[in-house]
Image (cartoon, rainbow, N blue to C red):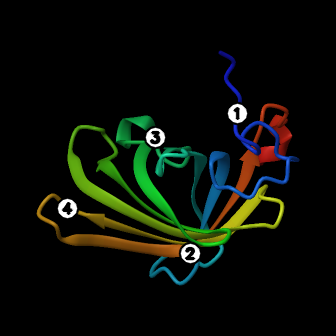
Amino acid sequence: MALVAPAGQDDPDSGSQTIVGFWHVKFVSEGSEGIPDGTEVDAGYSQWHSDGTEIMNSAGRSPITGSFCLGVWKQTRAGTYKLNHFAAAWDSTGSNLIGPANIREEVTLDPKGNTFAGTFTIDQYDEAGNKLAHVQGTITGTRIGVATKEQSIF
């Protein structure tokens, strides 16, 4: 039996209008206390799966501090999706658990399904459930396919 990727998962030019696939993402602060607007606060690679789950490898965090987070998503209307994901955040030594970080996104695909844009919030908690920090802003994503060149993701 041959495996066939759904339209859009392996070809950014397919015109697919599904969030399912591999994305290069960027998080830019807007309206976050103590962080200038326009500051890139994270970037990385996100995989949205057809079963409603998601995983992100954060390029903005060192692996020793926890660079992966897992989430769940649902489509809220045509071309628009909500994501709720969590990460275990560690201090800069990677030895002390800070607590869970909750990242929420609402994104809308472009008509061809090759990019998305929307908003995000990140709330960092300690292990007792006290909110330590809040960051908000805009997120953008660019679909990655088998023919995507490295210069396409900067």
Q: Mark 4 points at which residue?
A: 126
Q: Which residue is drawn at 85% across and 33% down?
A: 147
- Mark 3 residue element: loop
Of 95 and 79, which appears nearest the observer?
79
Q: Are marks 3 and 1 in contact (CB under 8 Å)?
A: no
Q: Are marks 4 and 2 in contact (CB under 8 Å)?
A: no
N-term-proximal mark, 4 vs 3 = 3
Q: Left of 4 or right of it: where is 11?
A: right
Residue ID for mark 1 = 5
Q: Distance from label 3 to label 2 (Cα)?
A: 21 Å
Q: Which of marks 3 and 2 is nearer the N terminus?
A: 3
- The numbered dot on residue 62 is 3
Q: Which amino acid does label 1 sit on?
A: Ala
Q: Name the residue under label 2.
A: 137
| Front residue of this view, candidates 27 and 11 | 11
Q: Is mark 1 on a helix, strand or loop?
A: loop
Is label 1 in contact with label 2 (beta carbons under 8 Å)?
no
Residue, far front: 1
- Which one is earlier in the sequence, the residue at label 1 or at label 2? 1
Label 3 crowd (10 A; few <14 / some 14-19 / many >=20)? some
Q: How far apart are marks 1 and 4 (CA)?
A: 40 Å
Discs 3/2, front: 2
